[in-house]
Amino acid sequence: MKTVDFWFDLSSPYAYFGATQIDAIAARHGAKVNYRPFLLGALFKSIGTPMVPLFSLSDAKRRYIGTDIVRWADVHGVPFRFPSRFPMNTIKPLRMLLALDEAARPPLIHALFRAYWGDDRDISDDATLTDIATREGFDPAPLLAANRDENVKAKLHEATQEAIHLGVCGAPTFIVNGLLFWGQDRLLFVEKALDGWVPANERGA
């Protein structure tokens, strides 16, 4: 079966947009999405990228990015409110996700993305996470306890190291047949790759 590895951190608005689209894209191509949470800040530190790239931009470019984000939300028809708490420490919700079996994660992933980027909720707050998990049908207690579980901590570290090893440089990143595509604006490339496309300059590489 064809697969798409979707590398994401909940802290990225573009990863949120990608998450709203990737399931439908995969379904159109008979593919399975492998949701791969990782810690974007740790990856940025490793590869020498500013911890919050938006803050390193010129005022003009930062204003443009703000406009661009809102336009993408409109194009995709998804709710969006730039969060009052930005950047967000996502370690706790990412560990919650990794405490679940992979197949059980997608509903909670989408709910967490929507809560932060659509509803401006604090997804580092235990009460908020409890409410979100409960609404999605999960028992929140063991998921919150995962934040202190050394095995779960190791899973997040290992996932982040794997992302670095693969050449991931931001979120979202999609990998299809070994081809890496960074950014939700590369979803056209993802679709073409699911149809078997390989860029001419990468054939036989």
Image (cartoon, grey):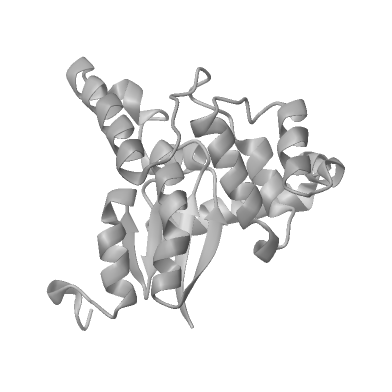
Residue for point 46% across, 51% down: 19
- Specify the quadrant that holds the C terminus: bottom left
Residue 70 vs 94, above or below: the answer is: above
Residue ID at (33%, 26%): 54
On the image, the x and y values in percent for residue 137 come to 78, 49
Report the residue at 36% width, 72% height from top: 178
Q: Nearer the viewer, residue 46 or 52?
A: 52
Q: Against 154, is 119 above or below?
A: above
Q: Is residue 133 visible?
A: yes
Can residue 183 be spotted in the picture?
Answer: no
Left or right of 13 on screen, residue 68: left
Quadrant in which residue 198 is drawn: bottom left
- Image coordinates for residue 24, horizontal then vertical, percent: 43, 63
Measured as percent of width and height from the top left, residue 86 is found at 49, 22
Q: What x and y, as percent, mark residue 202?
A: 19, 74
Q: What is the number of callouts on the image?
A: 0
Question: What residue occupies the far front of the structure in this picture?
Answer: 77
Which residue is outermost to the left? 200
Who is closer to the viewer here, 135 or 8?
135
> Of residues 196 and 39, which is closer to you in this image?
196
Image check: 66 left or right of 91? Answer: left
Report whether 124 appears left or right of 51: right
